[in-house]
Amino acid sequence: MKLYSIGELEVLTQIKAHTIRIWEHRYNLLAPTRSEGNTRHYSEEELMKLLNIALLNKHGVKISQISRLTPNELREKASEVVSKDLSVKLGVEQLMVASLNFDQKKIEELFHSYNSEYGVENTFEKIVFPYLRVVGNLWVNGKITPGHEHFFSNLCKQKLFSVIDQLPLPENNKPNILFCQPEWDFHELGILYYYYLFRKSGYNCTYLGQAVPSTDAIQTANRLPAKVIICTFIGPTTPEKVTNYIEEIVNQTTSDIFVSGPHVDFPLSDYHKRVTVFRDRQVLIDRFQLKQQPNSI
């Protein structure tokens, strides 16, 4: 059974640790175990309970009222909020509850509702990606299983591929853009989203996706030919591997190369004038004049 610290509960639920302690003491909402050093530890069941409490509280239900609910009443009322309230403020908690329960039906319903209300880009940028950032560190530290992360990420990829399939064919006068990740990297959602943004803006795009050896990226870039290569480095790696991968592409293609990710934290732009490090999608939006969806949130 996985156990969570109060700090991890704070990250997952967006409820301050100080507030959690008050709720424990005043309303007996949670019953953590304690280590020999008197450190609180919370079970998965208590995490789910606190997520439901957070949903109701952010929806305006007073904590004194919540404390009087039975466990079944708490779950039922939280489920009502998940189904009816599409507020972005509740989006992370809604996805968290559904994902931790592997509730594909509920996630499908949430995606449909979010997309109808806000559109694809606002759904991903204001809800999906913030959710993934919240759970990312906990997944790395083993507090959320890899199965949870893969389950949710693959559902997101399915949604993006479905939207991409419905886009019109690209314009012939736009340059070729190649999208890929290195052979050790399987974290595909971010670069797939970039691919969607370029396709939506009419660019000719070739998507190789995850786990692409540099030789394959080079051959494809030269065959197209690709004006630009966009590559993200998300999975565990070393600066040497990142540099070698980029160096091979630089030396064997004529493409401009845009790279991003947590492992690109050294001045690659000084390494070669054809390499651009971008920290967020706005750089790509401005540089390539990508179409933006109005912010309806």
Image (cartoon, rainbow, N blue to C red):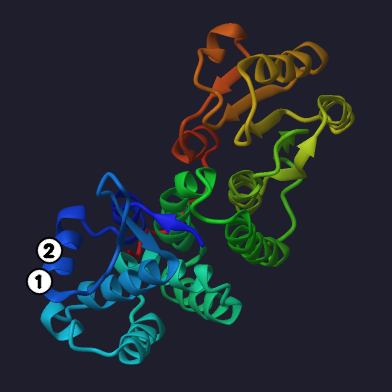
Q: Residue 249, located in which quarter of the rendered image?
A: top right
Q: Amino acid at mark 1?
A: Arg
Q: Which residue is mark 2?
A: 22
Residue 207 placement (x, y as % from top left)? 76, 45
In the rendered view, tell whether residue 135 sits above or below residue 227: below
Q: Residue at x 52, y 56 (%)?
A: 144
Foreground residue among 169 and 255: 255
Residue 19 placement (x, y as % from top left)? 15, 60
In what quadrant of the picture does the C terminus appear? bottom left
Count up the numbered dots: 2
Q: Residue at x 45, y 52 (%)?
A: 135
In the rendered view, tell whether residue 115 sits above or below residue 230: below
Foreground residue among 168 and 74: 74
Residue 176 visible, this angle: no
Circle on res. 183: none
Alpha carbon of mark 2 to alpha carbon of mark 1: how far?
6 Å
Q: Secondary structure at mark 2?
A: helix
Q: Residues within 10 Å of mark 1 (few under 14, many from 20)?
A: few
Residue 145 visible, this angle: yes
Q: Secondary structure at mark 1?
A: helix
Is the C-beta separation of discs 2 and 1 under 8 Å?
Answer: yes
Left or right? Give the position of 170 relative to 50. right
Q: Residue at x 42, y 60 (%)?
A: 127
Residue, far top: 271
In the rendered view, tell whether residue 26 sits above or below residue 285: below
Q: Residue 203, located in which quarter of the rendered image?
A: top right
Q: Which residue is mark 1?
A: 26
Q: Amino acid at mark 2?
A: Ile
Residue 218 placement (x, y as % from top left)? 84, 25
Q: Residue 219, located in which quarter of the rendered image?
A: top right
Residue 286 placement (x, y as % from top left)? 46, 36
In the rendered view, tell whether residue 23 sits above or below residue 108: above
